[in-house]
Amino acid sequence: MAYETERNEMVAQQLMSRGIGDKRVLETFRDLPRHEFISGQTSSGAYADHPLSIGEGQTISQPYMVALMTECLRLEGNEKVLEIGTGSGYQAAVLGCLAAEVYSVERFQSLADKAQQVLDKIGFKNIKIKVGDGTLGWQEFAPYDAIVVTAGAPHTPVSLIKQLKNNGRLAIPVGGSLNQVLTVIEKKGKKLLPTEICGCVFVPLVGEEGWQKD
């Protein structure tokens, strides 16, 4: 019950108060046990309004940023979604509640294994994870209705654009290594229509079409 209360407060104080209005997104955040994705002492702050370390120099984003990026994808329930940067698995779980299929690429085997364990424990059957270079996407299951990148990129990887369906949406933080701008790119035929959403700070997107190994 304590966690349920914390989730309700998180939704009201961190999400709705900042303009998150998608009812399906809000309901997912009320129901999904975020604390399951955070092991150790930090689990007590699972619903706090800030990122948390999850090991390997990576973080789980603050709830608001996860909700904002998810809302930007405008998911209706039948989509196939690609996530770059599995991390704790929380963003993948949110997507798994809102879309038909989720494919997630993680750079670190240890994080992929932990995320898979939690997702299996909760009971997700529509999420697949692989370890690899996220900047190259996951060609096997392309194209995707939506793509979300949970790390900061110096530019939008060409591979991800190619794997995005026509009329699809890609949410990605783009900018320097220390701060970025959350950008949503809509693919309209041969045209790419970018919209800048807000400033943000993510760990670097490392890979062939991102930052070089840190």
Image (cartoon, grey):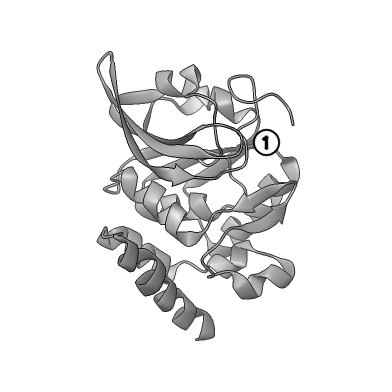
Quarter of the image for residue 199 reads top left
Q: Is residue 82 visible?
A: no
Residue 142, position as x, y percentages in the image: 43, 25
87 over 168 or under it: above or below: below
Amino acid type at mark 1: Arg
Residue 4, position as x, y percentages in the image: 46, 80
Report whether 99 appears left or right of 63. Answer: left
Q: Is residue 64 visible?
A: yes
- In which quadrant is the C terminus drawn? top right
- Identify the residue shown where x is 73% and y is 46%: 57
- Identify the residue shown where x is 26% and y is 60%: 21
Residue 182, position as x, y percentages in the image: 42, 40
- Identify the residue shown where x is 64% and y is 64%: 38
- Identify the residue shown where x is 50% and y is 49%: 92
From the image, tell me which residue sits under label 1: 107
User: What crowding class fits label 1: few (fewer than 14 Cα within 10 Å), some (14-19), or many (20 or more)?
Assistant: many
Residue 18, position as x, y percentages in the image: 33, 62
